[in-house]
Image: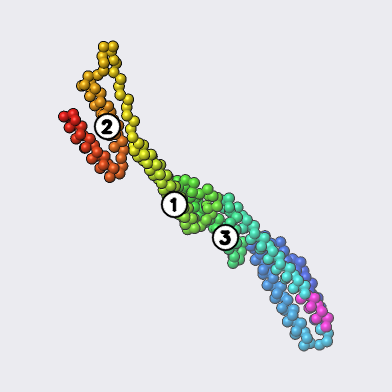
Amino acid sequence: MVSSSLEEFADAFRTSLSELTTELTTDAEFGQAEQDVKQLKTVEKALTDAKAKALEQAEEVNRLFESIDELSAEAREARLKMERQIKAKKEEVKASLIEDGIGRIEADAREAFRGAFEDAIKGKRNLRSMAEACLKVATTMNARIEQARGLIEQAEQETPGLVPDIRQLEIYPIEKLESELQRRKDVKAAQEAKRKAEEEARKAREEAAKAKAEAEEARKPAPLPPAPKPNPSPRDKGPTEDEEWQLFADMVKRVFRTLKGHKENLRHGVNQEKAARFGQAVNKAWKEVTNE
């Protein structure tokens, strides 16, 4: 009687096993598969318990033990197979959702966001919540990228050439991006200040060299202008006394006009004072000679 009942159970059980769903694509199918696993565990435990109880019964339970062991092994194998299928399918679906999310990122370096999608679906129990989490990550990251591009564009307008690597910087977190942009601005400002200082130093050296050359030129004695040659006439033996003095006076004036130009080029106060005293002495002597 017990053997007959077990055979009927075995037939019914195996029929149920053949009807289990193993193609998993929807949340409902995943949910049913997990319920089937729980029921198989229940059957497995019930059979194990039945075996323990049968051990207390008469000798005729030997064949019952064999059947129970066989059914228990089949239940375990079916359970393990379904668990493996559920796990593999879930991983496949997760990977698909992650790839879809990455494809939604509006940046060339979108692969950098893979970790964000992987973190987003951790702990999610169904396909819908995973898909919603991935969509939220894509939306949030695209908004951040758009904000980053605005900051980069503003920085480029203020400091042209600051961001030659925009495709890399546009995926930075905003705080990190702002810090990097400020660092680059500081570096560029320091370089520009150095360039200007070097340019000013160069100009100062050139001006100093020019001033030195002018001073050296000013120290050179001015060449005396040639005396004008009178047009002698056959009857004229030379200039008169007054004409001769006028020629000399004109020559002196030309020489002193040249000296005056050199005097104005003097840059040192001591030399300027000496030149002034020299001029005063010459003026005084000239007045005494000419009675002017």
Above/below status of 109 relative to 38: above
Residue shown at 25% from the left, 42% from the top? 273
Figure quadrant of the N terminus: bottom right
Query: What is the CA distance from the residue labelled 3 to the residue labelled 2?
Result: 89 Å
Task: Determine if the magenta segment contains residue 83.
Answer: no
- Would you name the residue on which mark 2 appears? 256
First of labels 1, 3 by sequence position: 3
What is the number of the mark on residue 116?
Answer: 3
Query: What is the CA distance from the residue labelled 1 to the residue labelled 3?
Result: 37 Å
First of labels 2, 1 by sequence position: 1
Residue shown at 47% from the left, 57% from the top? 179
What is the number of the mark on residue 190?
Answer: 1
Above/below status of 10 relative to 252: below
Tell me the amino acid under the disc marked 1: Ala
Tell me the amino acid under the disc marked 3: Ala
Decide: marks 3, 2 in contact (CB < 8 A)? no
Is label 1 in a helix, a strand or a loop? helix
Looking at the picture, tell me which residue is in the foreground, 176 or 72: 176
Label 2: few (<14), some or many (≥20) within 10 Å? some
Residue shown at 21% from the left, 21% from the top? 241
Which numbered mark, 1 or 3, is in the foreground of this view?
1
Left or right, 269 with reference to 206: left
Left or right, 72 with reference to 150: right
Region rendered in magenta: 62-72
